Image (cartoon, rainbow, N blue to C red):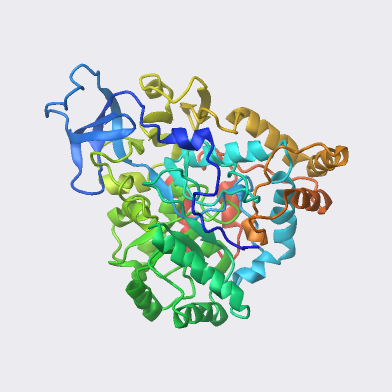
């Protein structure tokens, strides 16, 4: 049984929703506003032309429109357009949990994964929520929406535990590990360290890296998550065995020194930085000076110790850079969640920049003055005016959404801060046939009485009825793809759970206790107490 997914994207059945995501049938659309294409210069007064799910032209507002757009009425976004943000590291299933009251500073991942508080407050509740047939779809819908409202259009880290079936996560937001698109190669993933005491595991990893290389895809891998020398030794063992390759998206890299980063450059691995999670679990993160003139990407990790979304993670990265006095400009951070992220997963031909013939995935942030790159970093969820995926409006301000076609008829109202928003995260044929509000209600109810949710699962198992749904994989608990779903359901029905845990609010601006929880952690780096101010 493999402990990771090679992500070939071939043996996995694709839902109609995944296939429809790039159906390339969106109607013609013209958006006006400031344009930050990331590749090339900013256009202060620009026009973006979209048709059939792709960008047709990116030009100044006064330039003649492309053929076929002469009669299309433009929509003034009153904002700044960026490529949709790509989150290169997340454990999405966990993103219903509020920030964990991390009880101490840890030296390695092995330490916190076995911590009693972690087991009680995170592992046990998720063991039920990710296996209960009534909360599985609710959990997926909720965490997808959480990403979408921040301007994130592609995510890593949501998979079914049962590999013979399709992944459950096939909604509006793109999934790096299941795509059904030749221009978006499906990534592989491995969480745990390679076990060098078992030659078959070493060979398994080598083959997975080779397979990812062959299909020009990424291999997501947690590399040296921790700060002790034992953690760093894992890197030297990997390099001694020539096991790393350019396809590896090296997540965390926390134990590496300057010489190690130089050797990573030679291999060509892409660095994935998760500064908030590193800081909360280990008391520090990468020295930002190591990122100067180096291509890197950013991932949130998860809500229990990381950013609620990429907008928060960008702010943490910015504060960390300023504290270190590192010469990493705002533009480099924007590139980390757009252009660099797409290149790291082999998606650069289709996404990552706003250019003709690329997919029309983009986010619009309210306002169009000031530094165009810092403008995105300092934005909050309230300022996300519009999110397009494949040319369709998936989320945005109510007034703006009313002017733009959506993928289906199932638009749903939402309030973020003081702004009225609308979301449309349904796709034809998707298994996720649940609204966001229904998802929220189910989760609130289940998380308020976890023993009752567990009893519900036990009752279903006792009837012998077919569950008809896939358990979600809890990859931080060592769960493996290919596991027998009935065994996973049974295990969840037997675990000891707390009475309740709160549901993590959808946004930072809508979470009154978010910063109190983070600032209560004794070893929080002092400069991160400024994070609250950036949301004032």
Let me know if residue 425 appears in the view.
yes
Q: Is residue 33 above or below residue 503?
A: above
For residue 212, above or below residue 357: below
Judge whether residue 107 can be spotted in this image: no
From the viewer's perspective, tell me whether residue 177 is left or right of residue 213: right
- Residue 182 vs residue 508, the one in the foreground: 182
Q: Position of residue 532 (x, y in %)?
A: 48, 49
493 left or right, relative to 25: right
Residue 331 percent across, percent down from the top left: 28, 53
Q: Residue at x 44, y 35 (%)?
A: 21
Is residue 381 rendered to the left or right of residue 363?
right
- Name of the residue lying farthest toward the right: 462
Q: Residue at the location (41% across, 52% down)?
A: 314
The quadrant the C terminus occupies is: top left
- Residue shown at 54%/52% (left/top)? 157
Residue 449: quarter of image = top right
Which of the pair 500/197 is nearer the observer?
197
Q: Which residue is farthest front? A: 11
> Residue 344 sits in which quadrant?
bottom left
Residue occupying the point 80% across, 41% down = 457
Name the residue furthest left: 63
Where residue 106 appears, as percent x and y from the top left, is 61, 71
The answer to which quarter of the image holds residue 245 is bottom left
Q: Which residue sits furthest top?
A: 71
* Quadrant where the image shows the N terminus: bottom right
- Comparing 100 with 531, the one in front is 100
Q: Is residue 133 above or below residue 347?
A: above
């Amino acid at each position: 049984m493999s402990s990771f997914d090679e992500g070939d994207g071939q043996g996995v059945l694709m839902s109609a929703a995944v296939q429809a995501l790039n159906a390339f049938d969106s109607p013609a659309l013209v958006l006006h506003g400031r344009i930050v294409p990331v590749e090339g210069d900013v256009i202060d007064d620009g026009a973006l032309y979209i048709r059939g799910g792709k960008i047709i032209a990116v030009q100044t507002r006064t330039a003649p429109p492309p053929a076929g757009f002469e009669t299309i009425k433009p929509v003034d976004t009153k904002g700044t357009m960026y490529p949709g943000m790509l989150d290169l590291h997340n454990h999405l299933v966990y993103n219903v949990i509020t920030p964990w009251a991390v009880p101490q500073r840890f030296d390695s991942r092995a330490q916190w994964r076995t911590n009693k508080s972690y087991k009680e407050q995170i592992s046990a509740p998720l063991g039920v929520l990710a296996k209960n047939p009534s909360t599985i779809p609710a959990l997926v819908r909720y965490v997808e929406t959480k990403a979408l409202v921040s301007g994130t259009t592609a995510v890593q880290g949501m998979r079914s535990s049962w590999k013979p079936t399709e992944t459950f996560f096939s909604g509006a937001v793109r999934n790096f590990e299941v795509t059904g698109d030749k221009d978006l190669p499906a990534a592989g993933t491995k969480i745990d360290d390679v076990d060098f005491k078992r030659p078959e595991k070493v060979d398994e990893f080598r083959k997975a890296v080779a397979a990812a290389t062959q299909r020009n895809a990424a291999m997501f891998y947690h590399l040296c998550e921790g700060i002790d020398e034992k953690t760093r030794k894992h890197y030297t063992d990997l390099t001694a065995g020539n096991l790393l390759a350019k396809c590896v998206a090296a997540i965390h890299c926390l134990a590496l020194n300057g010489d190690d980063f130089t050797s990573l450059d030679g291999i060509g691995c892409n660095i994935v930085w998760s500064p908030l999670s590193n800081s909360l679990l280990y008391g520090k993160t990468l020295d930002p000076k190591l990122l100067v003139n180096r291509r890197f990407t950013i991932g949130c990790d998860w809500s229990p110790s990381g950013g609620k979304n990429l907008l928060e993670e960008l702010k943490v990265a910015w504060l960390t850079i300023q504290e270190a006095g590192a010469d990493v400009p705002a533009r480099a951070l924007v590139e980390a969640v757009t252009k660099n992220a797409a290149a790291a997963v082999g998606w650069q031909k289709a996404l990552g920049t706003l250019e003709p013939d690329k997919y029309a995935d983009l986010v619009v942030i309210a306002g169009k003055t000031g530094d165009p790159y810092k403008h995105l970093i300092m934005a909050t969820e309230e300022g996300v005016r519009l999110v397009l995926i494949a040319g369709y409006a998936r989320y945005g301000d109510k007034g703006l959404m009313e002017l733009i076609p959506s993928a289906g008829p199932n638009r749903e109202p939402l309030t973020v801060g003081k702004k009225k928003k609308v979301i449309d995260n349904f796709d034809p044929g998707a298994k996720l046939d649940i609204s966001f509000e229904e998802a929220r209600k189910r989760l609130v109810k289940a998380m308020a009485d976890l023993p009752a949710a567990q009893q519900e699962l036990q009752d279903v198992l006792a009837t012998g009825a077919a569950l008809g749904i896939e358990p979600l994989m809890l990859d931080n608990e060592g769960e493996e793809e290919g596991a027998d779903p009935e065994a996973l359901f049974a295990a969840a029905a037997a675990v000891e759970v707390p009475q309740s845990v709160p549901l993590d609010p959808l946004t930072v601006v809508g979470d009154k206790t978010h910063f109190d929880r983070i600032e209560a952690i004794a070893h929080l780096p002092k400069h991160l107490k400024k994070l609250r101010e950036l949301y004032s």
